């Protein structure tokens, strides 16, 4: 039951990545198309656009959600690859705890960076 639940979360994380990364790619790399449609009025790499995204709650939440989904999806997939090697019970536990600690640490750091971005944007970098 636990494996099925974790696998379902893995698939769900993949879908979240698909949607949010698609949104990111559209905003960042199809600015000409969005400008033609009247949606985007500035180049996404200009400082004003970067600062506006950094101060936007929507972008902050989507970046944190994308980070969490990508970390879970990647680390769970890596864990499954390692489990295919059929490690012993102790090594399985070390792998589970190690990947969880590293994943949570990376998530905490990335979340801190996303939340600190508005302050850095107002200071000019």
Image (cartoon, rainbow, N blue to C red):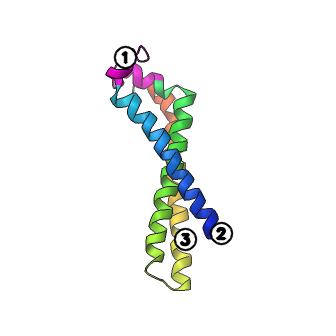
The answer to which of marks 2 and 3 sits earlier in the sequence is 2
View extreme (right): residue: 1
The magenta stretch is 31-52
**Which quadrant, please, contains the N terminus?**
bottom right
Residue highlighted by disc 1: 35
Q: Residue at x 47, y 83 (%)?
A: 86
Residue highlighted by disc 3: 96
The answer to which of marks 1 and 3 sits earlier in the sequence is 1
Instruction: Look at the numbered discs 2 and 3 and tell me whether their residues touch, using CB distance below 8 Å.
Output: no
Above or below residue 15? Residue 124 is: above
| Residue 97 appears in view | yes
Left or right relative to 37: residue 107? right
Instruction: Say which element carries label 1.
Output: helix
Residue highlighted by disc 2: 2
The answer to which of marks 1 and 2 sits earlier in the sequence is 2
Instruction: Say which element carries label 3.
Output: helix
């Amino acid at each position: 039951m636990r494996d099925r639940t974790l696998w379902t979360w893995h698939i769900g994380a993949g879908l979240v990545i698909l949607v949010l990364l698609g949104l990111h790619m559209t905003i960042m790399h199809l600015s000409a198309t969005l400008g033609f449609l009247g949606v985007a009025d500035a180049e996404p790499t200009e400082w004003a656009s970067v600062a506006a995204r950094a101060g936007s709650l929507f972008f902050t939440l989507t970046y944190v959600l994308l980070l969490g989904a990508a970390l879970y999806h990647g680390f769970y997939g890596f864990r499954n690859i390692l489990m295919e090697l059929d490690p012993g019970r102790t090594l399985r536990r070390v792998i589970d705890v190690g990947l969880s600690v590293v994943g949570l640490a990376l998530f905490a750091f990335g979340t801190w960076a996303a939340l600190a971005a508005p302050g850095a944007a107002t200071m000019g970098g």
